[in-house]
Image (cartoon, rainbow, N blue to C red):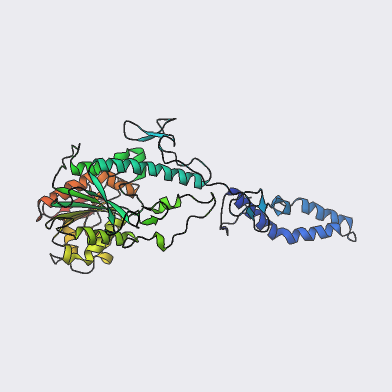
């Protein structure tokens, strides 16, 4: 079959191995049908010599099986099945039902062990098994149910730490399209506010689902991070009663009208469908959230509706520390670059995970020699954490590209796993910058000397 299969399949609708095989058979039959018809004509022509007819019969019998019309099945284009297919429409009468998995950890066959890891009940050494079926729909729905369980656990723990949810826009009601965000109870009283803009692919309060499975629920979510900041059961030394926290939500920006909640793209694809082979639900204007239609708008909404409400939602003199993850950090950089004159007195420092901005694209308005410029602020009071196999905090090249010093995150493969490994180093540095507003990040120059890397630091190093 491989000798006939085309490198690029001109297929649409439901696709699996059986559909691809049937499609290949149809293509091969179409290609060789004139030859088969010619040989059949020779075989049945009694006026031709018997030798010619016998050679045609032999040649016909030696042709590949895929050239025969009997190999072609009437398969359903929506489900790939070959039974009860209406020939005129190539649609089966009975499509497979959409799989259903309960959003219950125990019913899914898992539990949280003493190390805070999610493991199988049948095999306590095995973590979450994504592939349970050859059909991707079953795997997708099961993962959606597992993620829902994790979100429930994380939400419960964050509430127990004193976080509450706010709806954006602030004027929206419980049933109106809105984006939930987490804020600490002391937001209006704290002199320092730490704002976290996460990745658009993650749910609210989740750093990385893969880290949740391997290292634990607290480690892969914002629970350990929040506990360290709010000073509950933490030995890391971050306790500060005058520090508030805001967890933005750059991922859940799709409004699902049926359940009246904001969800991510991944959750949208796992929503129930009419059958297992139906296309995903189509998004319309009803699924858009005002002022939060994408992650850039959401970042602007957090600044405009919450952080700018000084004297009402935050203190007049509150200083703001920003932690930006991938697109969340890019959105914050773009917004502040455009509105720097208004926010310059209030921003203390910025820490980025997997930076996506570029000095030649996002930081070109002012000269770095101007002390009050945003690019000057980025060069002295901003740092970025990137993928690297070095230990956390090891200096790396990247100043020319990002306009700030770059450091190793301790993670070398997945950008979503940077935050679980580097947030402690981020908080230590942000606390140092907040304690001394006149301090700045020295410019690190990374040079290669005879194949070995060396760092030269101007000024007092970190």
Q: What is the x, y in percent for residue 399? A: 23, 58
Disc tally is 0
The reply, left or right, for residue 371 in relation to residue 43 is: left
Q: Quadrant of residue 40?
A: bottom right
Which residue appears farthest toward the right when viewing the image?
Answer: 47
| Residue 401 in sight in this render | no
Compare residues 19 and 56 and report the one nearer the observer. 19
Q: What is the x, y in percent for residue 30? A: 69, 60
Q: What is the x, y in percent for residue 308? A: 19, 61
Compare residues 141 and 366 and report the one nearer the observer. 141
Q: What is the x, y in percent for residue 129? A: 44, 39
Tell me the residue at 25%/54% (across/down).
397
Compare residues 431 and 452 and report the one nearer the observer. 431
| Residue 377 in sight in this render | yes
The reply, left or right, for residue 45 in relation to residue 61 is: right
The reply, left or right, for residue 50 in relation to residue 437 is: right
Can you say whether 127 is above or below 331 in the image?
above
The reply, left or right, for residue 214 in relation to residue 348 is: right
Compare residues 125 and 359 and report the one nearer the observer. 125
């Amino acid at each position: 079959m491989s000798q006939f299969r085309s490198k690029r399949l001109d297929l649409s609708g439901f696709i699996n191995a059986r559909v691809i095989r049937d499609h290949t058979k149809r293509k091969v039959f179409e290609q060789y049908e004139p030859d088969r018809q010619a040989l059949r004509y020779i075989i049945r022509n009694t006026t031709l010599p018997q030798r010619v007819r016998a050679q045609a019969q032999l040649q016909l019998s030696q042709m590949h099986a895929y050239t025969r019309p009997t190999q072609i099945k009437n398969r359903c284009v929506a489900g790939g099945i070959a039974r009860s297919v209406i020939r005129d429409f190539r649609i089966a009468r009975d499509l497979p039902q959409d799989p259903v998995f309960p959003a219950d950890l125990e019913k899914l066959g898992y539990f949280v062990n003493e190390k805070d890891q999610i493991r199988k009940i049948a095999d306590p050494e095995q973590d979450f098994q994504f592939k349970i079926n050859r059909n991707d729909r079953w795997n997708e729905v099961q993962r959606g149910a597992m993620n829902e369980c994790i979100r429930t656990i994380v939400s419960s723990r964050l509430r127990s730490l004193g976080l509450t949810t706010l709806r954006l826009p602030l004027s929206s009601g419980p049933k109106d399209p809105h984006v939930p965000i987490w804020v600490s109870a002391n937001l209006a009283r704290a002199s320092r506010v730490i704002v976290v803009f996460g990745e658009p692919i993650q749910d609210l309060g989740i750093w990385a689902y893969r880290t949740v499975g391997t290292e634990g629920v607290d480690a892969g979510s914002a629970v350990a991070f929040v506990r360290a900041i709010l000073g509950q059961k933490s030995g890391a030394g971050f306790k500060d009663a005058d520090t508030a926290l805001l967890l933005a939500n750059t991922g859940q920006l799709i409004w699902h009208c049926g359940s009246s909640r904001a969800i991510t793209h991944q959750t949208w694809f796992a929503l129930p469908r009419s059958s297992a082979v139906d296309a995903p639900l189509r998004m319309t204007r009803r699924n858009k959230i005002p002022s939060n239609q994408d992650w850039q708008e959401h970042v602007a909404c957090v600044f405009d509706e919450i952080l700018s409400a000084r004297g009402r939602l935050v203190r007049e003199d509150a200083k703001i520390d920003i932690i930006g993850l991938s697109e969340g950090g890019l959105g914050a950089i773009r917004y502040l670059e455009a509105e720097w004159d208004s926010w310059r007195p209030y921003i203390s420092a910025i820490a980025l995970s997997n930076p996506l901005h570029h000095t030649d694209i996002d930081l070109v308005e002012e000269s770095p020699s101007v002390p009050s410029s945003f690019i000057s602020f980025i060069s002295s009071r901003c740092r970025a954490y990137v993928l690297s196999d070095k230990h956390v905090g090891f200096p790396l090249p990247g100043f020319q590209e990002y306009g700030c010093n770059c450091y190793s995150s301790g993670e070398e493969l997945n950008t979503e796993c940077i935050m679980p490994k580097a947030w402690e180093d981020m908080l230590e540095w942000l606390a140092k910058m907040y304690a001394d507003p006149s301090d700045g990040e020295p410019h690190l120059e990374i040079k290669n000397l005879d194949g070995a890397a060396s760092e030269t630091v101007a000024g007092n190093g970190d």
